[in-house]
C-alpha cells in the first residue's frame, strides 16, 4: 500500500504527482490524501485504481494572484493548519497503520513524513 499526499494549492503538484502514480504497479494499492478534486485525479490517472481520502495539511503560499505572495495571509492560514497537524498526528499514524501503508510519498506537505 502506497499513501500519496498531494497538496491542493494549485493543480501543478497534482498533475506532477499523478504522472508518478500512473506508473506505479497497478497491483499495488494506492490511497491519495488530498483536497485535490477527485475528477482531476481520475482524469490524470487514466484509470489507475486509487482511493481518495480528502484532507488538508498545508496551504502553500497565498496571494492575490498566481505570481504574488501575501506573507501575512500565508502565515495566518498556515499557523492554524500547523496546530491542527500537531493535534492529529496520532490519528494520522493510526490511519497509516490501518491502511497498511508500506510507503508514504508527499508532494509538498511535510506533515505526512512526520506521521510516517
Image (spheres, helix red, strand yellow):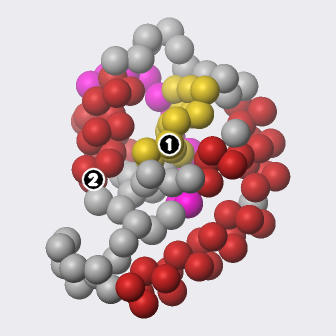
Q: Tell me if mark 2 has few (under 14), some (14-19) or many (20+) residues whose alpha carbon lies within 10 angstroms of its own.
A: some
Q: Which residues are magenta?
A: 46-57
Q: In this image, 95 relative to 23: left or right?
A: right
Q: Is residue 42 visible?
A: no
> Does the magenta portion include 70?
no
Foreground mark, 2 or 1? Answer: 1
Q: Main secondary structure of the magenta part?
A: loop
Where residue 5 appears, x then y in whole percent?
51, 44
Report how far apart the C-alphas of labels 2 and 1 lie in the structure. 15 Å
Residue positioned 36% across, 72% down in the render: 61
Which is nearer the eye, 35 or 38? Answer: 35
The residue that mark 2 highlights is 11
Q: Position of residue 116 (x, y in %)?
A: 70, 39
Residue denoted by label 1: 106
Q: Earlier in the sequence, mark 2 or mark 1?
A: 2
**Within the magenta stretch, is there residue 52?**
yes
Amino acid at each position: 500500500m502506497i499513501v500519496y499526499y498531494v497538496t491542493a494549492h494549485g493543480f501543478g503538484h497534482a498533475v506532477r504527482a499523478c504522472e508518478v502514480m500512473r506508473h506505479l504497479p497497478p497491483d499495488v494499492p494506492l490511497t491519495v490524501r488530498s483536497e485535490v478534486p477527485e475528477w482531476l485525479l481520475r482524469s490524470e490517472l487514466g484509470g489507475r485504481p486509487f482511493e481518495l481520502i480528502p484532507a488538508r495539511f498545508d496551504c502553500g503560499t497565498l496571494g492575490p494572484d498566481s505570481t504574488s505572495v501575501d506573507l501575512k495571509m500565508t502565515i495566518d492560514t498556515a499557523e492554524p493548519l500547523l496546530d491542527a497537524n500537531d493535534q492529529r498526528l496520532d490519528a494520522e499514524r493510526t490511519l497509516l497503520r490501518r491502511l497498511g501503508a508500506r510507503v508514504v510519498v508527499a508532494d509538498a506537505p511535510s506533515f505526512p513524513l512526520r506521521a510516517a
